[in-house]
Amino acid sequence: MSQRIVGVDEVGRGSLAGPVVAAAVVFLDGMVGINIKDSKQISAARREMLALHIRHSAYDWSIGAATAHEIDQLNIHHATLLAMRRAVLGIRASIDYVYVDGKFFPDIPCPGEHRVKGDETTPVISAASIVAKVFRDRQMIWLNTIYPQYGFAQHKGYPTRQHRSALAMFGLTDEHRTSFRCGSPKDEA
């Protein structure tokens, strides 16, 4: 009998603005069916294509997020675990096992394990990494239409020179994390 294996990964931990986003994807026996790797090692165009393929071929998938406000309230570590929890709880199918990228496992009612650098070694986590990255990038591009002076479409909220210059000139938006200073989280676990 096939097992429903879930991969979970997040994006946006080091960003100064926007949410931290996690994706959970389910593949039977964890078999993704394509050769993929960590989302950071793939071009944006290829990520878009792969994310579409993954969403269509996965048994199920879900997105979870924690807002900038939640990040400021909880800290980035706990907000990341919250986004992961939301992603896993969004899965409609029953789950047999969960693989989570990183050092920590979220509070979820499912058996599983965390894997450091799992996005590089475990295909079902790599698939989640791609889906999360594409979702968050699209969200930051949309935020660019509201706040075009910040350049979110280019840097996706990360602490680039362009972003820091815009912050110095225009100040913070509601999408910025006030608990982050100079690109370093104040309270990261």
Image (cartoon, grey):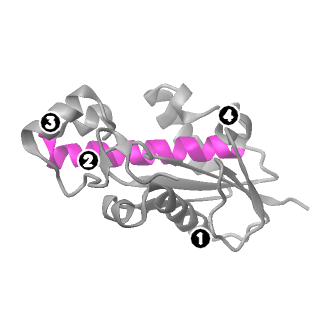
Disc number at residue 120? 4
Nearer the observer, disc 2 or disc 4? 4
Left or right side of 149 for 177: right
Left or right side of 65 for 174: left
Q: Earlier in the sequence, mark 1 or mark 3?
A: 1
Q: Which amino acid, by three-letter code, is at mark 1?
A: Leu
Q: Earlier in the sequence, mark 4 or mark 1?
A: 1
Tell me which residue sits at (70%, 30%) in the image: 35
Give the magenta part as a residue range: 124-149
Q: What secondary structure predominates along the stretch shown in magenta?
A: helix
Q: Which amino acid, by three-letter code, is at mark 2?
A: Trp
Q: Which amino acid, by three-letter code, is at mark 3?
A: Ala
- Provide the residue designation for mark 1: 89
Q: Earlier in the sequence, mark 2 or mark 4?
A: 4
- Provide the residue designation for mark 3: 166
Q: CA distance from mark 2 to mark 1?
A: 26 Å
Label 3 Cα neighbours within 10 Å, binned few <14 / some 14-19 / many ≥20: some
Q: CA distance from mark 2 to mark 3?
A: 17 Å
Label 1 Cα neighbours within 10 Å, binned few <14 / some 14-19 / many ≥20: some
